[in-house]
Image (tube, coloured by chain):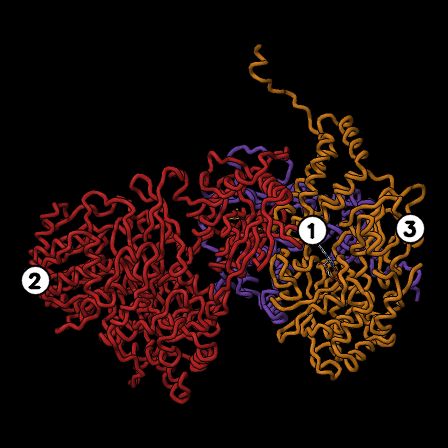
Chain colours: A purple, B orange, C red
């Protein structure tokens, strides 16, 4: 059984199988025999992957052989300079690499590792820990729909379903159900390319998707920053 | 009903700029502190105010600062702006609308603690708010409120805004520290406590946004005066985020100790037309649930604790009678399973196991005995974990199973009647036991 | 930071009073009261406890919550309860949680029988599980590397393996991915976990999740026996336990010794045991008959060898390789000096040092020990690469920096893997160690005007030299200098030794514990061999000899010009292990009689040996070796010798007898006793005293008998300038941990065998039109070596580094100095 496994074509993994979060494209090793799949989270990306013995060990990338875009380098170095210990810049550096490459691809992680003088393993351990760092390719439009308790009491699950339906298989979209985004006052809500909008009704969905496609501001009337404090004492 | 300190003028246009903030008297308390008070005096005022942490644990804030050893090493102040507890969104409103209040509070707290480096750890999803704070930091630095030799006092403080990337556990103070150090956000073993060995192994004070934002007001009023607001053990005002099945969800500033009913019904308008409150979380999703009969409890740390729950982050989530309690439990358990960092056994495995048990309850594949096991698993989690994230699931789930056992049981029964195979297709071609088939 | 001493306190454990050193973690302190507290994640060797598994919960009076015994230090008067219902319930609960994921496939699990999870479940588990959901199943086992298989189903996420990778070996390759119950142990993007110390995670894993590909399913714990000995594959001389089944070594485990290895092994030490049992092993005496090596009887082989030696007489040269034991070296010296009246014998590869300098460098009062690496204030790593030269010491150095804030200064030609941990780094031209030491000495003495000049001679940056000097002077009084034997190689080796002693004189207080010099010799038992007299200019115990002989280089030259007739090669193939391969080729070809002790026929022996005596493997040997810090350690046979292989002490003794110079030894232990008696500073030592832990002779009173010698300060003459790159590049060489025949022969390790690569910096590469991965030829004075270009940003401009110790294309083909690089 031990041996090299070829990575194969992408397989869609239902959201339920990765906690409640992402829909991810997961390359899978070629199945060698039928393994019964249980609906209890067995299909975590990576669990079934062997090391590729044709690769070299992943040491700290050598600057001599790892080209990095100058702007990305400057950004990461600026982050490193802010902290007493440069390692603190791991998340900002990965976020920068993600903006630059679209996701935390192996290449993106290697480049960040090269600048930070860390192993790519260190950074991939960090990247896979945080929900906002994408370690699989994703669409460029980020739509996080909060489906946590307060929002789902106000219909977030229906909103999520409706949104997935509306977006269909448009590869430009990265629609994820997210844990509480800290805006339960506008439940059910979504974070659309970092802009909070809500309450999002089911009727808003087609409009919203159109606006995202067109690159215009999402639901301009329902953006969080317009909302006044509801506390009667806070009048001014 | 409401009592305004933090929210005074909160919606004033431009309050997020330093000019408007200063016009409103902003940074005056900082000036006073730096020019007239010794660090110990500031700590004393904070102690006298009776201020307790607004982030969840409710630890006396002045005392926390007094724990910082007076040694000559780099000390740190960290503002916990991770705000990820479901139902909590108060820090967001403060940071978005009055970032300088937070900054002023931070410089005051840092001065009291002798910290020279400070950080704001803000959750990565709060992009707008982070941008606003970044802008505010630039302004405050230009105006000389942050940086070297602040207002000529000889006190130095650097401030860095650090954006997280999506992990609830980074709200837990030691998980936050690891994350801020560039690692996976796993909580650390305590002791050592952050006050002794925190960020980069140095003494560290960690406070919630609201806690820090309150400090300038305490200095303004004087600790003793502030202590007069609220109750004896729960001084001051508190921002309460009300959400869920209420008519007017949002943040309200209240005087601690007012009846909970006043907040849920008086301010937030109560449940929608024709609905009743079924249960409510008084302090975020991690607090054990309360029932309608508890609505008259005074909303303060002590009363809620006596009732078997807690004030937590001050986030009230109201669930009305149209919602099955199992749905609420499953939602919560899945949240904690997703957010468990995976470091310690009971939390990692306990949250996973609880979700699978609840899924069976929901699909009718459970028996009442499973409810006993579920309750016992929650007990096995509580107190045995590395941090309290495990407890944060086990306490509310445990309380739900206990208080709504009848509903759980009928849920199982109804689900079984609805889908006899637990939702699965019956096996079209059952393999009979060999011997039995031939006999 | 000097090693702290602990006071004793008393605490109450389940009602009994127990004395314990203060500060010990409860999990360990409980053992002193004969109570075992179960643990999974706790392993003190891995540093601070993490408290992750929660298995060790106990009750402490006065604390409401249960506490983790692995992270709670005992305090005086503490009252601890480990047997209460509350504790039992918690323990059962944790085990129930852990077993949710665990497949319980013990009958087919390689760990079965020696599995902590199995044992703890039997001892502390509730014996039932209420988890009725289906367990998770994954494809298994999977390759984590060619050496290690991973079975993720069995993993209990105890963090031990990833902590090892991150905090002990610091290679940061093995990590945890994802979060929560989805976490799994893995590497970046499917890269294999290949690193010099990766195998340790197999021993650390408390379940069957990480298993050795080489050992899997070869034996069960009840089929095997453990046998303690010492690994002689490098000077670190780690203490090992061979797992033996039916006279075969099945595996090598660490035998934790804080004074030597700290419980770790490198992968060479862990897996190269396979070379013991390969088919190509020489197991019979061989004799060259009609140009072919053929098996012959022992008598014939010994007679032929004796005849050849007798006819060469004093024109015999002998070289002892680093794997030779003290006893073998002693008998070789007896054979050469007594039987043949020849002093042409050597164990150093790069020229000899005067007796006095040797005595001064290794004087007991100037000798640092392994533990000093961990507790020094400052440490200078000079002209050596610990991970290649004595791998396990690399871990010790990292530990000292990590735990005790040791200030590290690195001064090497080739970029070191320790650079990122160093407080100061200085580079100098390959071979310019003398000039560098002189510059450092000047900097330490505040002779700033001279520093620039000397640094220039060394090809070093004066500012770097100054910074390095500052680290050594500012850190504190305990300074340790670890240097490679290569520093004192070459015609100016003595000058370098004097310069080094001058530096030592400035930063080391002779006679003070916790500081000193530590040499990493080129051969595993390099130190012992010199002390038993395998030197051209000193006899056993460093006694003076009347007419010194030729050193290794001299022997090669003499043989090449027909002045030496016979060559005696004890565990050495000069073509592989010695510099100047061209000269040695000639020497071997010209010698009329070449006698070798060898376990494998390397190219040189295959072509040139006349008599080959089958050598014992280190698992078969008995005898002693001496660690670089003076610890005399004992090898004990774990398996019996295959076929006709004989004890080599016996072969040497037989030869002596045939040459009428009987050493009078009849057994191995008798040889050791004779040796100890012959050497004043080992006088009275016995094998029993050495036992399983070894004895540091510099710590024994007899060490006073070590010859007195002038330790400086010496007047130094101006060192020569390092060659200036003029389009051609300076050649630096190094021998990697993997450049060893044992690596090439062990099936499991083969994939690691070293290949020649030319390391150069991007600027030089660009100028030469060479890209990363290109095939290049490196040439000097008519000889050339093929290599793959490997670009490294950290290589200093003007220098290229090549590996030595390779079978083919070894850097020893080339002369030191400048080399030309062209794309092939
Ligand atoms: C799982 C978990 C999540 C937490 N999340 C937050 C948070 O998002 N924001 C916060 O201020 N405190 C949070 N806390 C509480 C902090 O650990 C800590 O008590 C608080 O930041 C201290 O500040 P305070 O004294 O001002 O309340 C969390 C605690 C736990 C156990
Ligand atoms: S593989 Fe073994 S050592 Fe590593 S985390 Fe899993 S159980 Fe622990
Ligand atoms: S051994 Fe103490 S928590 Fe693992």
Residue to which mark 1 is pinned? B389
- The answer to whether residue C681 is left or right of residue B90 is left
Tell me how far mark 1 sits from mark 2, CA to CA: 82 Å
Structural crowding at the residue carrying mark 1, measured as other residues with C-alpha within 10 Å and reported as few (<14), some (14–19) or many (≥20) = many
**Image point (14%, 64%), residue name:** C317
Tag 2 subunit? C
In the rendered image, residue C574, in percent from the top left (x then y), is placed at: 22, 61
N-term-proximal mark, 3 vs 1: 3
How many numbered discs?
3
| Circle number at residue B116 | none
Tag 1 subunit? B
Tell me how far mark 3 sits from mark 1, CA to CA: 28 Å
Residue to which mark 2 is pinned? C312
**Image point (31%, 83%), residue name:** C713
Badge 1 element: helix
Looking at the image, is B154 positioned above or below residue C275? below
Label 1, ligand 1: CB separation under 8 Å: yes
């Amino acid at each position: 059984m031990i041996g090299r496994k070829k990575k194969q074509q992408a397989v869609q993994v239902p959201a339920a199988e990765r906690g409640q979060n992402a829909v991810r494209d997961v390359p899978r090793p070629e199945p060698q025999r039928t393994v019964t799949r249980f609906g209890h989270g067995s299909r975590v990306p990576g669990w079934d992957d062997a090391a590729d013995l044709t690769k070299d060990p992943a040491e700290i990338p050598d600057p001599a052989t790892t080209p990095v875009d100058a702007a990305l380098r400057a950004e990461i170095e600026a982050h490193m300079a802010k902290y007493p210990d440069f390692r603190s810049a791991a998340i900002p550096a990965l976020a920068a690499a993600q903006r630059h490459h679209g996701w935390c691809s192996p290449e993106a992680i290697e480049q960040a590792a090269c600048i930070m003088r860390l192993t790519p393993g260190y950074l991939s351990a960090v990247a896979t820990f945080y929900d906002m760092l994408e370690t699989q390719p994703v669409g460029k439009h980020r739509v996080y729909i909060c489906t946590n308790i307060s929002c789902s009491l106000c219909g977030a699950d229906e909103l999520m379903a409706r949104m997935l339906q509306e977006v269909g298989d448009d590869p430009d979209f990265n629609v994820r159900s997210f844990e509480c985004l800290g805006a339960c006052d506008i439940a059910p809500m979504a974070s659309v390319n970092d802009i909070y909008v809500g309450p999002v009704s089911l009727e808003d969905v087609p409009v919203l998707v159109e606006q995202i496609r067109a690159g215009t501001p999402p639901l301009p009337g329902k953006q969080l920053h317009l909302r006044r404090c509801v506390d009667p004492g806070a009048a001014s | 009903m409401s009592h305004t300190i933090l929210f005074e003028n909160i919606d004033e246009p431009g309050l997020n700029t330093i000019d408007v903030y200063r016009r409103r008297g902003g940074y005056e308390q900082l000036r006073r502190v730096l020019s007239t008070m010794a660090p110990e005096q500031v700590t004393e005022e904070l102690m006298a105010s009776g201020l307790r942490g607004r982030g969840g644990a409710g630890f006396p804030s002045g005392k926390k600062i007094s724990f910082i050893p007076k040694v000559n090493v780099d000390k740190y102040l960290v503002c916990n702006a991770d705000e990820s507890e479901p139902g909590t969104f108060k820090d967001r409103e403060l940071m978005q609308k009055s970032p300088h209040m937070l900054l002023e509070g931070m410089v005051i707290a840092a001065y009291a603690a002798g910290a020279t480096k400070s950080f704001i750890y803000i959750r990565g999803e709060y992009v707008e708010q982070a941008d606003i704070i970044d802008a505010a930091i630039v302004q405050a630095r230009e105006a000389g409120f942050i940086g070297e030799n602040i207002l000529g006092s000889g006190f130095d403080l650097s401030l860095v805004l650090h954006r997280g990337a999506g992990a609830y556990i980074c709200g837990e103070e030691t998980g936050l520290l690891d994350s801020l150090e560039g690692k996976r956000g796993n909580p650390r073993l305590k002791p050592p406590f952050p006050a002794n060995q925190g960020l980069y192994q140095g003494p560290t004070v960690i406070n919630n946004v609201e806690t820090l934002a309150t400090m300038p007001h305490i200095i303004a009023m004087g600790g003793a005066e502030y202590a007069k607001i609220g109750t004896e053990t729960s001084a001051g005002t508190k921002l309460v985020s009300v959400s869920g099945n209420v008519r007017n969800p949002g943040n309200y500033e209240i005087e601690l100790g007012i009846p909970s009913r006043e907040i849920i019904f008086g301010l937030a308008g109560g449940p929608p037309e024709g609905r009743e409150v079924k249960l409510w979380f008084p302090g975020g999703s991690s607090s054990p649930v309360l029932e309608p009969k508890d609505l008259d409890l005074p909303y303060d740390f002590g009363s809620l604790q006596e009732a078997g729950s807690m004030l937590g982050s001050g986030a009230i989530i109201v669930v009305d009678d149209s919602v099955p309690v199992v749905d609420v439990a499953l939602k919560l358990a899945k949240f904690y399973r997703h957010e468990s960092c995976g470091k310690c056994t009971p939390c990692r495995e306990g949250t996973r196991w609880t979700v699978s048990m609840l899924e069976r309850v929901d699909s009718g594949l459970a028996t009442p005995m499973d409810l006993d096991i579920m309750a016992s698993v929650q007990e096995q989690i509580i107190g045995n974990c590395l941090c309290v994230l495990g407890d944060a699931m086990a306490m509310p789930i445990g309380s739900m199973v206990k208080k709504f056992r009848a509903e759980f049981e009928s849920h199982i029964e109804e689900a079984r009647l609805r889908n006899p195979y637990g939702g699965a297709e019956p096996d079209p071609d059952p393999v009979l036991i060999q011997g039995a088939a031939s006999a | 930071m000097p090693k702290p001493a602990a006071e004793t306190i008393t605490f109450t454990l389940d009602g009994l009073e127990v004395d314990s050193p203060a500060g010990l973690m409860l999990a360990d302190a409980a053992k002193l009261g004969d109570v075992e507290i179960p643990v999974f994640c706790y392993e003190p060797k891995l540093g601070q406890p993490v408290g992750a598994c929660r298995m060790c919960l106990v009750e402490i009076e006065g604390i409401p919550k249960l506490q983790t015994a692995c992270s709670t230090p005992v305090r005086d008067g503490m009252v601890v309860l480990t047997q209460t219902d509350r504790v039992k319930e918690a323990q059962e609960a944790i085990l129930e949680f852990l077993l949710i994921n665990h497949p319980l496939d013990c009958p087919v699990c390689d760990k079965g029988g020696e599995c902590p999870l199995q044992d703890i479940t039997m001892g502390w588990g509730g014996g039932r599980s209420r988890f009725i959901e289906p367990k998770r199943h994954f494809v298994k086992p999977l390759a984590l590397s060619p050496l290690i298989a991973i079975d993720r189903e069995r993993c209990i996420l105890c963090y031990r393996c990833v902590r090892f990778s991150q905090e002990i070996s610091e290679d940061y390759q093995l990590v945890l991915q994802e979060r929560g119950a989805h976490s799994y142990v893995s590497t970046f993007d499917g890269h294999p976990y290949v690193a010099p110390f990766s195998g340790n995670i197999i021993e650390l894993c408390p379940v069957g999740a990480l298993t050795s590909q080489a050992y899997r399913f070869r034996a069960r714990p009840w089929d095997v026996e453990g046998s303690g000995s010492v690994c002689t594959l490098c000077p670190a001389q780690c203490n090992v336990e061979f797992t033996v089944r039916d006279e075969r070594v099945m595996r090598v485990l660490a035998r934790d010794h804080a004074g030597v290895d700290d419980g770790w092994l490198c992968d060479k030490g862990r897996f190269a045991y396979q070379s013991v049992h390969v088919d190509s092993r020489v197991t019979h005496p061989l004799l060259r008959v009609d140009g072919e090596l053929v098996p012959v009887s022992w008598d014939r082989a010994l007679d032929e060898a004796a005849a050849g030696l007798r006819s060469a007489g004093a024109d015999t040269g002998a070289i002892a390789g680093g794997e030779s034991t003290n006893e073998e070296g002693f008998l070789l010296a007896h054979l050469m000096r007594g039987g043949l009246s020849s002093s042409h014998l050597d164990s150093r590869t790069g020229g000899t040092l005067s007796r006095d300098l040797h005595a001064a460098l290794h004087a007991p009062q100037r000798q640092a020990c392994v533990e000093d690496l961990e507790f020094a204030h400052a440490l200078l790593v000079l002209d050596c690469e610990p991970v290649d030269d004595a791998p396990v010491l690399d871990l010790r150095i990292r530990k000292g920096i990590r735990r005790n804030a040791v200030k590290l200064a690195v001064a090497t030609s080739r970029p070191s893997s320790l650079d990122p941990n160093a407080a100061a780094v200085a580079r100098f031209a390959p071979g310019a160690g003398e000039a560098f030491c002189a510059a450092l000495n000047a900097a330490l003495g505040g002779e700033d005007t001279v520093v620039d000049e000397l640094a220039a001679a060394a090809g070093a940056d004066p500012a770097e030299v100054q910074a390095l000097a500052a680290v050594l002077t500012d850190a504190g009084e305990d300074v340790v200098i670890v240097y490679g034997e290569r520093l004192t190689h070459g015609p100016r080796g003595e000058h370098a030794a004097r310069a080094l002693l001058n530096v030592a004189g400035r930063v080391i207080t002779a006679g003070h514990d916790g500081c000193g010099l530590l040499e990493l010799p080129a051969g595993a038992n390099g130190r012992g061999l010199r002390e038993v007299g395998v030197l051209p200019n000193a006899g056993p115990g460093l006694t003076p000899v009347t007419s010194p002989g030729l050193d290794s280089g001299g022997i090669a030259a003499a043989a090449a010009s027909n002045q030496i007739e016979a060559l005696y090669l004890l565990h050495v193939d000069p073509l592989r292990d010695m510099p100047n391969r061209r000269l040695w080729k000639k020497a071997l070809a010209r010698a009329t009689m070449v006698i070798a002790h060898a376990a494998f026929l390397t190219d040189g022996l295959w072509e040139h040996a006349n008599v080959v005596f089958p050598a014992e493997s280190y698992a078969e040997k008995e005898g002693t070796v001496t660690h670089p810090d003076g610890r005399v350690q004992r090898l004990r046979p774990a398996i019996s010798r295959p076929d006709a292989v004989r004890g080599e002490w016996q072969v040497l003794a037989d030869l002596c007898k045939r040459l009428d110079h009987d050493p009078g030894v009849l057994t191995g232990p008798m040889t050791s006793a004779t040796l100890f008696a012959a050497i004043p500073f080992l006088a009275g030592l016995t094998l029993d005293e050495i036992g399983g832990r070894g004895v540091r002779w510099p710590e024994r009173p007899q060490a006073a008998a070590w010859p007195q010698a002038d330790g400086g300060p010496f007047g130094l003459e101006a060192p020569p300038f390092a060659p200036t790159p003029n389009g051609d590049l300076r050649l630096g060489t190094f021998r990697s941990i993997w450049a060893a025949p044992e690596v090439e022969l062990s099936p499991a390790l083969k994939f690691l065998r070293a290949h020649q690569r030319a390391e150069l910096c991007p600027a030089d590469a660009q100028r030469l039109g060479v890209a990363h991965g290109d095939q290049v030829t490196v040439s000097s004075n008519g000889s050339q070596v093929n290599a793959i270009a490997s670009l490294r940003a950290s290589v200093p401009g003007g220098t290229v580094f090549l590996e030595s110790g390779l079978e083919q294309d070894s850097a020893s083909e080339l002369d030191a100095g400048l080399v030309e690089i062209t794309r092939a």
